[in-house]
Amino acid sequence: MRLSSFFMPTLKESPADAQIVSHKLMLRAGMIRQTSAGIYAWLPLGWRVLQKIEQIVREEQDAAGAQEILMPTIQSADLWRESGRYDDYGKEMLRITDRHDRDMLYGPTNEEMVTDIFRGFVRSYRQLPLNLYHIQWKFRDEIRPRFGVMRGREFLMKDAYSFDIDAAGARRSYQTMFLAYLRTFARMGLKAIPMRADTGPIGGDLSHEFIILAETGESGVFCHRDWMNLDVLADAPGYGDDLQAFFDKCTGIYAATDEKHVPGESPVPEDQLVSARGIEVGHIFYFGTKYSKPMNAVVAGPDGNPVLAEMGSYGIGVSRLAGAIIEASHDDHGIIWPDSVAPFNVGLVNLKPGDSQTDTVCQDLYHKLRAAGLDVLYDDRDERPGVKFADMDLIGLPWQLVVGPRGLKNGTVELKRRATGQKEEVSEEFALTRLI
Ligand code: ATP
Ligand code: MG
Ligand code: MG
Ligand code: MG
């Protein structure tokens, strides 16, 4: 992509209405545009990141055995009356009336709808276990939408729903998602700590929130300091293995949200307890028959008798993650994207458009990098080098490849790693082998 024709409306100044760094940087980098309170349009740079995040989530869900579907955003209120949540959910639910005066709603979550799909088709325990997920926009009329996409009203969520014949199966499904979540966040360069959590309006008795520690986080959390230097995935089992020992190990190291933490009653000595703030990027629940019972989602068990499905649900804040990753990875100059979610792999900077040798070398690098399958943003604009460097640092692509007449005289280009700031004068060929 040539920057001269790429729609990336960057801002020089920090927008006054943005309070936290990720929101500021997303606006400054031209990733998003607010269209109403808590509702955002994703511009090309932001949309690329969102799709990268979504794809990592999708790959791990698929690897864990979940199957992707797509349920609508608009739901019928009748389903929610069946579960009893239509009245309970309160003002966060956006309620809509259609032209026939039917009560509809914009889905804040999908337990009812997926249970309805399940009961419409699944008849036998032999069809279980089953885990269905989708990646879809949700709407919650948050009382205080803020911090950009971190607390939007319309936001993108991955939500999965598991169905099992018994509690042992459901626990296994829960543990599989637990592992999938750790892997998913690790692939984005994030350290997410699974914390014992409240089940809130979803209900149930077993629940973990996946939390990224950050001062700007909205959740108060407590954990054992061992979590600080721990890589739980180092000796993690595979999805098909027995996960109980791994799960016990992870949950054996204390970590709890402030709703679950009782001061003075945690098993951790005071001097080993970390009290911090965090961002909730995922949340998993095992709630048994909370929905299958009122909605009569039964299958025939091995003896032919009807059995209520044992269920769990598993959410990831896909759009929130875009902000959370920036909170975890930035410096004074801008965003530092982990390779896995970067909107482009390489920023190619032409220091002197119009200089024929510089143009030729840039063209050559651009074509070779793209032919190798890399996404390249080619800054071919007629701008001062300082402007180009500042924009590249702001948008945070993992690599910058800088080409100018002075270097070319010595046969070199400059390769810069955004994360470390390290620069190398190298030959064109060396740069290509390093990047490809
Ligand atoms: P929060 O405590 O932040 O309000 P929640 O507990 O209400 O979140 P869940 O019902 O657990 O949210 O939804 C699953 C995931 O969806 C959350 O872990 C979070 O990452 C994401 N999410 C929830 N609300 C929002 C929102 N308003 N904007 C962006 N992402 C959200
Ligand atoms: Mg909430
Ligand atoms: Mg929460
Ligand atoms: Mg939650």
Image: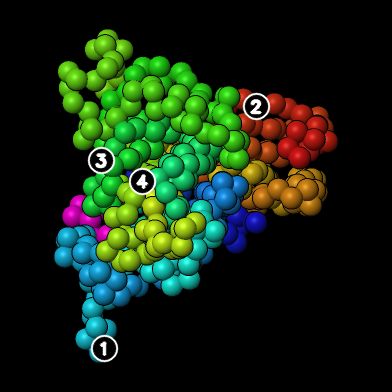
CB at disc 2 and ligand 1 closer than 8 Å: no
- Relative depth, front residue between 51 and 185: 185
Query: Which residue corresponds to the image point at 36% horizontal and 17% vertical from the top-left?
Result: 225
Horizontally, residue 222 falls left or right of residue 337, namely left
* The label number, if any, that marks residue 99 in the structure image: 1
Name the chief secondary structure element in magenta. Answer: loop
Report which residue position mark 3 lands on.
198
Q: Which segment is the magenta one?
A: 140-145
Report which residue position mark 2 lands on.
423
> How many angstroms separate mark 3 from mark 2 (CA)?
47 Å
Of label 3 and label 4, which has the lower sequence position? 3
Q: Nearer the viewer, mark 1 or mark 4?
A: 4
> How many angstroms separate mark 1 from mark 2 (CA)?
62 Å
CB at disc 3 and ligand 3 closer than 8 Å: yes
Query: Quick one: SS at disc 1?
Result: loop
Of label 3 and label 2, which has the lower sequence position? 3
Does residue 99 appear anywhere in the picture?
A: yes
Q: Is residue 107 above or below residue 317?
A: below
Q: Nearer the viewer, mark 1 or mark 2?
A: 1
Q: List x then y, in percent, for residue 65.
A: 57, 50
Please state, as top left, top right, bottom left or bottom right, where the N terminus lies in the image.
bottom right
* The label number, if any, that marks residue 286 in the structure image: 4
- Relative depth, front residue between 103 and 165: 165
Q: Nearer the viewer, mark 3 or mark 4?
A: 4
CB atoms of marks 1 and 3 within 8 Å: no
Q: Amino acid at mark 2?
A: Lys
Of label 4 and label 2, which has the lower sequence position? 4
Query: Which residue corresponds to the image point at 33% horizontal and 72% vertical from the top-left?
Result: 75
